[in-house]
Image: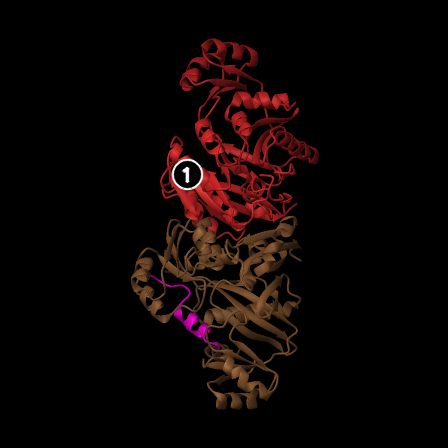
Chain colours: A brown, B red
Amino acid sequence: MSDRLAPGARIGILGGGQLGRMLSVAAARLGFTCHIFDPGPNPPAGQVAARVTTAPYDDSAALESFARSVDVITFEFENIPTSALDTIEAIAPVRPNRRALAVSQDRLSEKTFLNGLGLATAPFAPVEDAATLDAALAQIGTPAILKTRRFGYDGKGQARLEAPGDAGPALAAMNGAPAILEGLVDFEREISVIGARGADGQVACFDPGENVHENGILRTTTLPARISRAQATDAVLIAGRVLNALDYVGVLGVELFVTPAGLLVNEFAPRVHNSGHWTQDGCLIDQFEQHIRAIAGWPLGDGKRHSDIEMINLIGADIARVPELARDPAVALHLYGKAETRPGRKMGHANRRLGPAG
Amino acid sequence: MSDRLAPGARIGILGGGQLGRMLSVAAARLGFTCHIFDPGPNPPAGQVAARVTTAPYDDSAALESFARSVDVITFEFENIPTSALDTIEAIAPVRPNRRALAVSQDRLSEKTFLNGLGLATAPFAPVEDAATLDAALAQIGTPAILKTRRFGYDGKGQARLEAPGDAGPALAAMNGAPAILEGLVDFEREISVIGARGADGQVACFDPGENVHENGILRTTTLPARISRAQATDAVLIAGRVLNALDYVGVLGVELFVTPAGLLVNEFAPRVHNSGHWTQDGCLIDQFEQHIRAIAGWPLGDGKRHSDIEMINLIGADIARVPELARDPAVALHLYGKAETRPGRKMGHANRRLGPAG
């Protein structure tokens, strides 16, 4: 895989949601064809991919056939079953590598890894049961957030503790899953950096964006973030440190808290990231093409921003805003082709161009 | 069709080459799904479309089934057989309309139409045989170019006459097809305007680009064109005049000669146009999305340019330049997924960002 894939090569993508869809389009732009593997029927990525396999992640025969049909495999989500990875990795290279997946799949190993690199995080402690939760509360105090160690996203699998008396209900909300108690961080703002590392070790980061979450779901990302030049440099260096430590190949999203004491790492995702969608209209090479370039062994784009952008997620009923947004000459729409609108479901996003990069 | 198509609607595209491919991606971005109709196996557009029908244009059953499966039909090339149009138009709306196709399919009707609007063209005369060619030469003189009235593109079906003595070989090169003799225009440069007209009559044009052709094939388009503000305004007004006169819905490319006596119209194409590929990296809404917006009854983008761009066609063996171009941080590549490289075949293009719009 230090070899460069030539146009015409085939890329396999595990997961056919909006991230797989936008990866598939980026791959086609470079002359690659995509094969999507997804358990659900009619995945959004299937509308713009050369081939789709519909099968569950425990169907070894389907996974083997999928892996044999492609030159490299990547994914749009981090919770891929270990057995599926075992199956495909025996046949085709998987980028980014399994260590990045393993570390980021588990909030405890993720934070331990980050602290081990000398990167600050919120205080945390593992929680298995009532006794370990009591001990964690004694160490961290309240307010705090109890989160499942695995399979949490968009605010799911989380319970907030305002006082030690909330321990019982919070623990019950974990449904017996291993958890982690995190101290609440008093932050000024949330930012994220989308970084990429090539097969040759080259690193390129996009400028930090400023994120606004609502109910645990990203609402907007705005470029530039309202941070100092020193903070922007720190953020990019943190992303580079994570990329190098993991011997990472591909795009990675790092979420950070800006606090009076400096930057804390909230979490990272070993994939293209919602907070990087602004790059589609703010940069010559966007995060999706950057990821494809990395896993294909191509040189990376430089991450330079030509325009300031506000990315607005269209969640659930927000899809009704499309006619209004389509009339705005400063807005580019990116819709995901999902037939059914559900509350909390990401239906698309709008990139509003604020002007030339400031 | 004054109704606005909602996301989820289905768009049919006649022709699955690179233009159909880039239209399909633009349609997906707005939440539409595409059905490609193409006589050849594995068309480039099929790699990024929800559905492909492989059948010849005289297969009425396939055409009917195709037309029934979509909400609106458009095309990537102008030489669609009349019988195919008859079949599909009885079932689904075709945009742009047939008059635009009929006028632009025939160089004689195209130039007659343009002159009828008061727009200047090169001098021309119809040629059927040796006698009419002699008459045409007497009227227009040499040098001149004899062209087939229909089915010419990328310099095919043309013969240059330096002197009246070239009449015989030139006429033979037409293979008996109806032809047109055009006087050679002494131009300073070639420019083109990509214009769009919405279902509601709204018109929006992209800035004129400056074109360089080699052997009848477009090599580069550069923005901005080296023309005066008055010439740019004239060019845009000409495109608007053609769009309105044809009651056009969609994107249209108009090629113009800049001469000391003013602008002459060379020809127009009732479709997205190679000289508009720069818009993918120079504008928020590119020509492909602009066309989809128009035929779907959506508001048009405003055509504003945020970046200066040089578009470089990758023709035949130029595909070998891809590794070098991929290393250039100012270049975005757009490859067409064609398996076979042939001399003269358009394999992709590169957009080089020259800087912010100047």
Q: Secondary structure at mark 1?
A: helix
Question: For residue A222: magenta?
Answer: no
From the viewer's side, name the closer residue of A120 and B92: B92
Is A283 drawn above or below residue B339 in the view shown?
below
Of all chains, the one bearing label 1 is: B
Query: Image point 41% across, 72% down: which residue?
Result: A99
Q: Is residue A358 left or right of residue B52?
A: right
Instruction: Give the magenta-colored segment's residue range.
Output: A92-107
**Disc 1 target residue:** B65
Which quadrant of the figure contains the N terminus of chain A? bottom left
From the viewer's side, name the closer residue of B305 and A184: A184
- Percent x, y of residue A141: 59, 87
Is B253 drawn above or below residue A213 in the view shown?
above
Q: Quadrant of residue A144?
A: bottom right
Mark yes or no: residue B347 visible.
Answer: no
Query: Image point 64% across, 23% down: which residue?
Result: B117
Question: For residue A95: magenta?
Answer: yes
User: How many numbered tags mark residues here?
Assistant: 1
Q: Quadrant of residue B291?
A: top right
Mark yes or no: residue A40 visible.
Answer: yes
Q: Amino acid at mark 1?
A: Ser
Query: Image point 67% across, 66% down: which residue?
Result: A226
Q: Residue furthest right?
A: B230
Q: Is residue B237 left or right of residue B313?
A: right
Query: Image point 62% across, 29% down: which residue?
Result: B242
From the viewer's side, name the closer residue of A27 and B91: B91
Q: Is residue A96 left or right of residue B2?
A: left
- Percent x, y of residue B320: 41, 45
